[in-house]
Image (cartoon, rainbow, N blue to C red):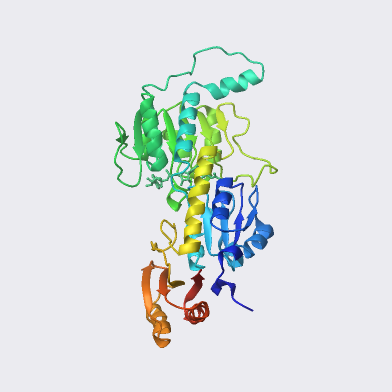
Amino acid sequence: MADDRKTSFPRQDIRVLLLEGISPTAVDAFRAAGYTQIELHDTSLAGDALRRAIAEAHVVGIRSRTHLDADVLQHARKLIAVGCFCIGTNQVDLDAAELAGVPVFNAPYSNTRSVAELVIAETILLLRGIPRRNAECHRGGWSKSAAGSHEARGKTIGIVGYGHIGTQVGVLAEGLGMQVLFHDIETKLALGNARAAADLHDLLSRSDVVTLHVPETASTQRMIGATQLAAMKPGAHLVNASRGTVVDIDALADALRSGHVGGAAVDVFPVEPKGASELFESPLRGLDNVILTPHVGGSTLEAQDNIGLEVAAKLIRYSDNGSTLSAVNFPEVALPGHEGSRRLLHIHRNMPGVLSQANDVFRERGINIDGQYLRTDSLVGYVVIDVTATESQASELRGALAAIPGTLRTRVLY
Ligand SMILES: NC(=O)C1=CN([C@@H]2O[C@H](COP(=O)(O)OP(=O)(O)OC[C@H]3O[C@@H](n4cnc5c(N)ncnc54)[C@H](O)[C@@H]3O)[C@@H](O)[C@H]2O)C=CC1
Ligand SMILES: O=C(O)CCC(=O)C(=O)O
């Protein structure tokens, strides 16, 4: 049986699978670039349905709900690239993808502003006690009182994770006259009048609103649990639009019921429904002092349209040109055009001797190399070789490269 991992395709034979309602801007970008085989799904896929669909795809686009673990990637025999049409890439086993020779791309900034705007809106609503008042009015209540209702001006917002989103939140909060404190594991340039807290505990104990903007990593798993919630000022509020695993949700429910945490706005959950047909279960349901949103921090039309364009452009560039610039799991190679040359891609395990064997393939056949580009990381090496060769010579060269021990994938670009 032919090994699909080592086969080349012209553009019109490349199958693009887009899940989770990715913006039509991405579809338009693929079509404009000559890709005609595009399969669209409004929801994510899981289990056997995902394995079946991915087995036939060369390029896959997902958002945050589709999990590409090592087992699913094992079934992706034809896959050449993955696009996460979002910021987070924790839903993909990045090492497994790299070892399958598959670069993963994302959109690191396109929904940053959307998340920051939602967080600021929620900060104001929480400080005013609006979630509870809204719930009471829906039940026919009319509790017209200033009790527990505060202006944002002069209050302190504590930002955990002072990266792209965290800094945007800080800038917008200062515009409201808030004091900005932040905590990050890296040393960060403070924007405006923002100040670094001494540590997480210091931030928690001084903030009226704590907002989380860390990625999902081993160090952020349940970083806000019962101890950290107890360290917050009595009546302070918590916003989580980062990842559900960052907060111990049962401990948060307890702290909200006791009133120690005054209110919360939560957009992300340890377990999220795969789609609209699945019931949303959470210990936070039914609590009047909580704003619940279905992971829509980055879901504005502006953000989604921009993400569609950005990630599709990265996938198309890799597919057409081989450039891995800004891939999140792969050696980055920025490549010029290859007009007049045939471009061969060779992705291999990073081990001694592979490059010299690759060069032998050309030397033994008397084929001159027009250009060569190489980058490695601890797991893989990515070498791109431009040659003057006929189509059949290129195909034969690719076969010889594919036979080198340690080869993960090879491709000829058209
Ligand atoms: N709710 C939603 O729809 C969205 C959620 N997100 C989530 O927001 C996260 C943050 O996004 P960006 O700001 O763009 O990421 P970023 O990478 O620019 O910033 C993350 C910051 O967190 C810091 N950090 C990492 N581990 C930490 C720890 N243990 N303690 C303190 N700081 C730590 C990093 O040093 C970095 O400065 C994403 O990883 C994603 O999970 C992103 C977009 C939309
Ligand atoms: O829009 C999505 O599906 C996910 C947004 C998000 O969480 C991200 O960009 O990391």
In this view of the protein, can residue 297 be seen by the observer? Answer: no
**Residue 198 x %, y %:** 30, 38
Quadrant where the N terminus is found in the figure: bottom right
Find the residue positioned furthest to the bottom: 364
Q: Is residue 399 above or below residue 287?
A: below
Classify residue 106 as left or right of residue 293: left
User: Which image quadrant for residue 322?
Assistant: bottom left
Kindly identify the residue that appears in the image at 48 percent across and 28 percent down. Answer: 121
Classify residue 218 as left or right of residue 23: left
**Residue 81 x %, y %:** 52, 61
**Residue 18 x %, y %:** 60, 53
- Front position in the image: 321 or 278: 321
Kindly identify the residue that appears in the image at 39 percent across and 36 percent down. Answer: 168
Classify residue 360 as left or right of residue 277: left
How many numbered discs sit on the rendered protein?
0
Kindly identify the residue that appears in the image at 45 percent across and 78 percent down. Answer: 389
Find the residue positioned furthest to the right: 277
Classify residue 149 as left or right of residue 132: left
In this view of the protein, can residue 368 be seen by the observer? Answer: yes
Kindly identify the residue that appears in the image at 65 percent across and 51 percent down. Answer: 41
Q: Is residue 93 above or below residue 294?
A: below
- Front position in the image: 209 or 178: 178
- Front position in the image: 121 or 248: 121
- Front position in the image: 414 or 50: 414
